Image (tube, grey):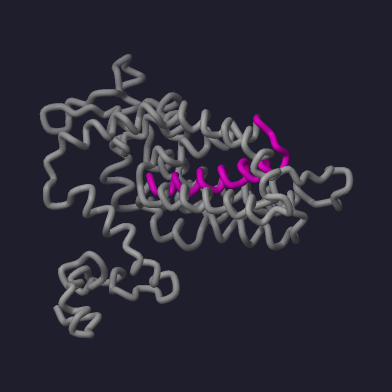
Amino acid sequence: MPVPGNTTSDARQPRWPLASVVGIVCLSWLALSWPWLSGAVTIPWDAKAHFHPQLQFLADSWHRGLSPFWTPYVFSGSPQVADPQSLIFSPSFALIAALNPAPDFRWSDGAVLGTLLLGALSFVLIFRDRGWHPAGAVVAALAFAFGAAAAWRIQHVGQVLSLGYFAVTLFLLSRALERGSLGYGFAAGLASGFMVLGRDQVALIGVYVLAGLVIAAILMASSPWRAFRTSLPPLLAGTLGAILVATVPILLTAFIAQELNRPAIDFVEAGKGSLHPAALLTGLIANLYGAAGPLADFWGAPSPAWKPASVRSGSISPAI
């Protein structure tokens, strides 16, 4: 994250092959995405069991002149507008629904992969702004779009969208702080609003990371108080943008959450499982708790095997 207010004229920056790097990234994205874009294969599991029917309902409702805010097909009826998985507030899926009354698998897969492309290009622009090596930009962009969380969570459409919007927000926020720009600040707020609308763990971690980067950039400046004053206008503009995008959908979701009848997994316990500090160890040791295998062998927090008694007895992984 650049130091707030520390702007550098483009005329003094070395020539950076932006068009070439963007072209390489886009061609590589197309080659790696082609099996899904061509329809030879499709993103499986939740992407088709949960999210694709939402896209079809959204498109069918709009093209028949009906409201997509309520669906009669879930239980005896459900407020679709309050469902985080409805895709109503997802720009890419909403655009597909507006253009195509009956989108097939390729359309929904294309929306997911296209959002990752936007995130990849955001990293290209971040590299360009800092004058870092163009080859590093290509590697970072493709690693973001096709590696790690993007590959492992690709079937969880909402989380992948949050990941893509995180990268876009990171780029816009960096420029907003570096240039003291209200426009970039407001745009960063809009992008972060769409990230937060995922209402998932990825969005929450994204908020923490962005907030941490802003705080670190201010504290590391030669004059933290001056950096804070410089960054305040774009941050306020970003707050306004995020409020405009995210407030109503989040309030609707919070309201319907009070009416749900899933006592086995309540919000508090789900939050503990998602945010338990022990989960950070998997960043160093993959599959530490057996989550990638049969879930019967999972012993991480907050599974039944994760007992206070096991800690007192000195055993971390009791037999199941």
For residue 228: magenta? no
Residue name at image x 49 percent, y 47 percent = 113
Residue name at image x 39 percent, y 71 percent = 282
Q: Report the front residue among 173 and 68.
A: 173
Residue name at image x 13 percent, y 45 percent = 262
Residue name at image x 50 percent, y 53 percent = 209
- Residue 127 is left or right of residue 315, and the answer is right
Q: In this picture, is 301 found above or below 216?
A: below
The spot of residue 167 in percent (x, y) is 55, 48
- Residue 180 is left or right of residue 194, and the answer is right
The spot of residue 276 in percent (x, y) is 32, 62
Q: Report the front residue among 171 and 314.
A: 314
How many tags in the picture?
0
For this orientation, the residue located farthest to the right is 12
Magenta region, residue range: 158-182
The spot of residue 3 in percent (x, y) is 70, 50
